[in-house]
Amino acid sequence: MQFSQVIGQSEAIGRLRQQADGGRMPHALLFCGPEGCGKLATAWALACRLLCQHPEAGDACGHCPACKMSRAAVHPDLHFAFPVVKPKGSKGAPVSDLYLDAWRQQLRTTPYFDRATWLERMGTENQQAQIYVEESNLILRKLSLKASQGGYKVMIVWQPELMNAAAANKLLKLLEEPPEGTVFVLISERPEALLGTIVSRTQRIDFMPIGEDELAAALERRNALDPATARAVSHMAGGSYARALTLVSTDEEADLFFDTFVSLMRLCYARKIKDLQLWSEQVAAWGRERQKHFLAYCQRLVRENFVYNFRQPAMNYMGKREADFAVRFARFINERNVMGITAELADAERDVEQNVNPRMVFFDMALRLIVLLIQ
Ligand SMILES: [Zn+2]
C-alpha cells in the first residue's frame, strides 16, 4: 500500500507525509472518521512509508524488500491489533494473532471494509467482537523487541473502542511510556467511546467521507465501471469506498434486483394477481438481508424515476439498464403516488426486519402497489 493508492484524503496524507519526511512522527496517532473512508488504507500506507528502505517523493518506493513485506502485511515491524471473537468451543480470550491469516487476506483483498465484513471473514455474524486484555499484553511484548530492521515499529490498532476496560488501561500505560521508535496508529469510528486519557495521548487526524467525484473516478479506474454507473454507485455509497465495493461486488445481485423490480411493476400494472403471488413466493425465499437490500433498492429506483420526470440528468443517479427502463416507466411515478409507493416499500422493509412472514409482506405490498400505480 502506498499513499498514492489511497482514494482522496489528500489533506490527512499531506500532513502525514510532512511528518514522515521531517522525521517528526508523533508516537501515537488517532485516525477518526466515518466507515469506509480510507483510515486503515492510510495507516497501512503510512506504515509502508515508514518502513521503506528507499522512500521516493514522500511515499514508499513499493519495490524494496521492506515494501514487499509491508505490502503483504508480513513485515516483522508492522503489527496489527483488532477486535476478534472467541472461536467455538474455546475458553480463553482470543488475541488478534489467532486471526492474523484472515486479517492479511482481508488487507490484500482490500483495506476498505466494514465491521460486518470482518466478522464474516472470521466466520461469524452475530458474535460481539472485542479486544481483550491479553491483546494489550501481547502488544507490549511485541513492541519491547528491538525493531528488526533498526527503524520504526508500527502498531496499527483497528477499532480500539472495542477494547474492554482492562485492555484500554494497559494500552494507556503503553501510550504514556511508548517503547522507543514506535508509532501507534489508532483507527476509530467512535472516538467518543475511547478513554479520554487515551485520546489526549494521541495526535488526532480527522478523515472526511471521500468526495463523490473522487469516489466515482476511483470506481471507473479500479472497478472498470462505466462513468454513469460509477456516478450512481458513488452517490449511493455516501463517501465510503467500502460501501461502494459492496454495491459493486453484488453485480449479479444488482441485475437480480433490477429484474425483480421490473417484473413487480409490470405485474402490478397488468393486475396479474396470480403471478404476483408467485412473485411474492420467490422473493420470500431469499434471505432476510437480501430482502431488505432489495426493498431499499426499490425505494431508490422509485425516487430516481420520479426525479427523471424533471429532466435534470445531473440530479439522476442510475445505471444503464435502469436509465433505459426509466424512459418508459418514469411517467408512472408521479406527485400523486411517489410518497405512497415509497412508504409501502419502507413499511415492507421494516416488517421484514421485524420478522413478519415475508410471503404476506410482499404479497400485501404488491396489492397496495396495484392501487397506487394507477394514480
Ligand atoms: Zn520501499
Image: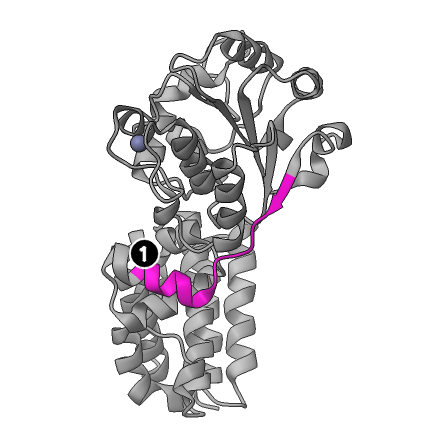
Q: Is residue 207 magenta?
A: yes
> Which image quarter holds the N terminus?
top left
Ligand 1: quadrant of the figure = top left
193 relative to 140 in the view: left or right = right
Quarter-wise, where is residue 212 in the image?
A: bottom left
Foreground pick, 47 / 261? 47
Q: Position of residue 297 (x, y in %)?
A: 42, 65
Return the residue at label 1. 248
On screen, residue 111 above or below 369: above
On screen, residue 76 above or below 214: above
On screen, residue 96 above or below 216: above
Q: Position of residue 367 (x, y in %)?
A: 45, 74
Quarter-wise, where is residue 57 in the image?
A: top left
Q: Position of residue 49 (x, y in %)?
A: 40, 34
Q: Is residue 362 visible?
A: no
Residue pictured at 41% horizontal, 73% vertical: 301
Amino acid type of disc 1? Val
Foreground pick, 33 / 250? 33
